[in-house]
Amino acid sequence: MIGEIRDLETAQMAVQASLTGHLVLSTLHTNDAPSAVTRLLDLGVPHYLLASTLNGILAQRLVRTLCPHCKQPHSLGAADWAVLADSHAAYPDAATPCRPVGCLECRRTGFLGRIGLYELLPLGSRLRGQIRGDMDLAGFTRAARAEGLRTLRQAGLEKVAQGLTTIEEVLSVLPPPAEPSSGPDP
């Protein structure tokens, strides 16, 4: 276990431990899982070492959970879902969204506890091949989505559809949606 990777020295230590067969777990501040690769490249880790040592990346965010004692069903229209959905996260057909109300159990906030949104990026051979010194983040992200990456946005959308949190809560922890890239898909 290595603490947060903030500099090249710590990143090199993590890579060296991985090269010697150790499972390395660490933290890194990025907006999403694909951005972790470009962050490590920006720190100065050679692309060939990243491609041979990274097994997976997990991005996570915590959102407040609606109070189960007082939440009320709330219908959302297509325009509401569109605020959260993007071209990779369409709004769900079967959904039971809820809204916060407030009661004594949640101290009149409408929320009680937190729940995680997770984005897991396993690095298979195709994605490892995408890791280069001149790597294009948008292209890498498209390749990851083509390999089945379930984004933080999709995870949030599912939690809203299940009535566990609200669209506003999810949007408060996510970075703004990326601008569409006009480049060719990998």
Image (cartoon, rainbow, N blue to C red):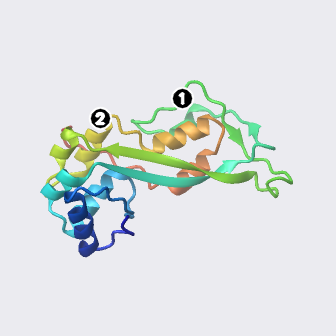
Which residue of the protein is positioned furthest toward the top in this rendering? 93
For the residue marked with disc 1, what is the amino acid?
A: Pro
The percent coordinates of residue 19 (x first, y second) are 19, 58
In the image shown, does 99 or 18 lie closer to the viewer?
18
Any mark on residue 92, and which? 1
Q: x%, y% of residue 102?
A: 81, 51
In the rendered structure, the answer to whether residue 48 lies left or right of residue 88 reads: left
Location of the N terminus by quadrant is bottom left
Q: Decide: few, some or many residues near mark 2? Use Cα within 10 Å; few <14, some 14-19, many ≥20.
A: some
Image position of 37 (left or right of 98): left
Given residues 70 and 13, the one toward you in this image is: 13
Query: Sequence order check: which comes first, mark 2 or mark 1?
Result: 1
Callout 2: SS: loop
Where does label 2 land, which residue?
A: 147
Residue in the foreground of this view, choosing between 38 and 11: 11
Mark 1: give few (<14), some (14-19) or many (20+) Cα within 10 Å: some
Residue 169: x and y, percent? 60, 51
Three-letter residue code for mark 2: Glu
